[in-house]
Image (spheres, rainbow, N blue to C red):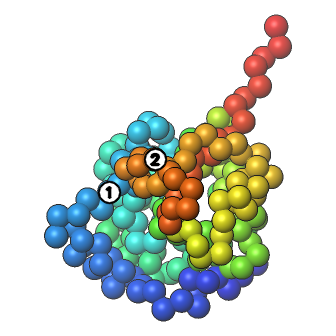
Amino acid sequence: MTHESRWTRSDAPRGDAYDRRFAQLRASGVDVHGEAAFVSSYAPASVLDAGCGTGRVAIELARRGTDVVGVDLDAAMLDVARRKAPALTWVRADLSTLDLARRFELVVMAGNVLLFVAPGTEAAVLERLASHLVPGGHLVAGFSLGSGLTLASYDAMAGAAGLTLGARFATWERAPFVEGGDYAVSVHRAAPASDPLP
C-alpha cells in the first residue's frame, strides 16, 4: 500500500528542475556533497539512500567506492537518477512499507525526507529503515526543525525501532548542535550483534 506523501502534495521542484538547483549551487562554488562526506566518514561498505531523489548523494557515494542503493517514491526523480547513473540500483518504493530483503551498514535520509512522508507514517518509516540495518549499523538523518517533527518525537520513534542516539550535529559539516537550532543531523545506531556465549 502506498500512502499519499507530503512530497506528492508539495510544489517542490521535481526531476530535472530539482537537479538544476544543485547544479547551480555547485557552479557557484557551493560544496553539494556534504552529506556524502559525512556518510563516508563512517566508512560503510554498503549504504541505503532512503528518499534518494535524483541521486545526488547516492551517486557521490558510489563514486567513493560504496555499494549503494537508492530508494524514492517519486518516479520523476528516479528517472533522472537512472539517466545519470544507470549502473546503480534505483528502487521506487514507499519507505513506510519498504522491504529490500537485504541489510546495509548505513541508511541515510538527507534532504528533509521524514518531513515529506505521508502524515502518520514516520514511525513506520523508521521501523522499516531500522530493519534494513546490520547489527551495529547507523541510521543518519538530517531535517529542518520547526516544521512539526521534533527531535524528542524523532528520538522516541527511533528508540521504538530499536535504535539508540549516538551523535547529533547542527550541520552535515558537524557543527555542534545547540538547542533551539533550526536543523539537526542525527546519528542513531542499531544494537550490535550479541556476543557469542563462551
Q: Is residue 30 left or right of residue 172?
A: left
Residue positioned 71% across, 58% down in the render: 152
The amino acid type, in three-letter code, at marker 1 is: His
> Circle 2 — which element?
loop
Judge the density around disc 1: few (<14), some (14-19), many (≥20) Cα neighbours within 10 Å.
some
Counting every numbered tag in the picture gives: 2
The dot on residue 33 is 1
The dot on residue 176 is 2
Give the vertical position of 137 relative to 52 (above or below). above
Judge the density around disc 2: few (<14), some (14-19), many (≥20) Cα neighbours within 10 Å.
few
Q: How many angstroms separate mark 1 from mark 2 (CA)? A: 19 Å
Return the x and y of residue 180 as percentages of the image width and height: 55, 62
Return the x and y of residue 58 as percentages of the image width and height: 41, 58
* 133 or 186, nearer to the observer: 186
Question: Image quarter for residue 92?
Answer: bottom right
Q: Judge whether residue 88 can be spotted in this image.
A: yes
Q: Earlier in the sequence, mark 1 or mark 2?
A: 1
Question: Which of the two discs, 1 and 2, sits closer to the camera?
Answer: 2
The amino acid type, in three-letter code, at marker 2 is: Pro
Q: Is residue 9 left or right of residue 40?
A: right
Residue positioned 58% across, 91% down in the render: 9
* 90 or 181, nearer to the observer: 181
